[in-house]
C-alpha cells in the first residue's frame, strides 16, 4: 500500500507520519533529508531529496511489494500523483491519500509563509478529486494529543484491515 500525505506546509503531516511509523515499512520524506542552513542550500538539498523520493515512490508503485510506504510531502504535485495513481491501479497496489487539514493561521504560527500557503491551496484542491473514495481527512485543529488520538484510531483501523503490524524504515 502507498500512503501519500497531503496538506499545507506546516499543517502537521510529518508529525502525523511520526505517529504512524508503527504501520509503515518505509517512510519517504524529502523534507527530513535537508540539513543546510542557508536558504539556497536548503532549496538545492530539497530538490535533490525530492527527486530521490520520487524515484523511490515510482519504483515502489511499479512492483507489487507486500509493504506499506508513506510518502511525506505536501502531496500537491498533480503530475506525480496521477502517475502513481495509475501505476498503483495497474499493479493492484492500494493507495490512500491522507489530507492533514489545518487552518492557515495555524500553519503561519508554525512557521509557514502566507505567500507559500496561497500557492498550495489551489494545487491541493486539484489533487483531492483524484483520490475520491481513497482519501482520509485528518483535522489538525487542536492539540497534539487530539492529533495523536486520530493517529491511534487510524492505526487501529489499519491493523484490522491489513491484519499485521509492520516494521519501519526511514528513508
Image: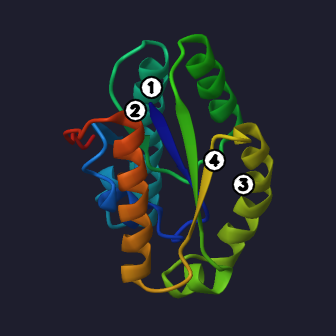
Residue 5 location (% of width, % of height): 52, 50
- Categorize mark 1 by other alpha carbons within 10 Å: few (<14), some (14-19), many (20+): few
Q: Quarter-wise, where is residue 119 in the image?
A: bottom right
Q: Quarter-wise, where is residue 156 in the image?
A: bottom left
Residue at (42, 22) in percent of width and height: 60
Gap between marks 1 and 4 measured at Cα? 23 Å
Gap between marks 3 and 2 measured at Cα? 22 Å
> Mark 4: which secondary structure?
strand
Gap between marks 1 and 3 measured at Cα? 22 Å
Relative placement, left or right, of 53 versus 8 is left
Residue 51 location (% of width, % of height): 46, 34
- Categorize mark 4 by other alpha carbons within 10 Å: few (<14), some (14-19), many (20+): some
Relative placement, left or right, of 115 versus 41 is right
> Mark 1: which secondary structure?
helix
Residue denoted by label 2:
52
108 w.r.t. 77: above or below = below
Residue denoted by label 4:
135
Q: Earlier in the sequence, mark 1 or mark 4?
A: 1
Residue 166 location (% of width, % of height): 23, 38
Q: Are marks 1 and 2 in contact (CB under 8 Å)?
A: yes
Asked whether residue 31 is in view, the answer is no
Gap between marks 1 and 2 measured at Cα? 5 Å
Q: Are marks 4 and 3 in contact (CB under 8 Å)?
A: no
Residue denoted by label 3:
124
Which quadrant would the C terminus be assigned to in this image? top left
Residue denoted by label 1:
55
85 or 53, nearer to the observer: 85
Q: Are marks 1 and 4 in contact (CB under 8 Å)?
A: no
Amino acid at each position: 500500500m502507498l500512503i501519500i500525505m497531503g496538506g499545507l506546509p506546516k499543517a502537521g503531516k510529518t508529525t502525523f507520519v511520526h505517529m504512524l511509523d508503527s504501520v509503515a515499512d518505509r517512510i519517504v520524506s524529502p523534507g527530513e533529508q535537508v540539513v543546510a542552513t542557508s536558504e539556497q542550500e536548503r532549496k538545492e538539498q530539497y530538490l535533490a531529496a525530492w527527486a530521490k523520493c520520487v524515484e523511490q515512490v515510482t519504483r515502489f508503485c511499479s512492483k507489487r511489494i507486500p509493504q506499506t510506504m508513506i510518502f511525506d510531502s505536501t502531496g500537491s504535485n498533480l503530475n506525480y500523483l496521477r502517475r502513481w495513481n495509475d501505476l498503483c491501479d495497474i499493479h493492484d497496489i492500494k493507495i490512500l491519500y491522507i489530507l492533514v487539514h489545518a487552518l492557515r493561521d495555524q500553519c503561519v504560527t508554525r512557521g509557514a509563509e502566507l505567500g507559500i500557503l496561497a500557492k498550495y491551496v489551489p494545487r491541493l484542491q486539484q489533487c483531492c478529486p483524484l483520490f475520491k473514495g481513497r482519501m482520509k481527512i485528518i483535522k489538525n485543529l487542536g492539540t497534539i494529543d487530539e492529533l495523536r488520538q486520530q493517529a491511534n484510531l487510524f492505526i487501529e483501523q489499519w491493523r484490522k484491515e491489513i491484519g499485521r503490524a509492520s516494521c519501519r524504515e526511514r528513508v
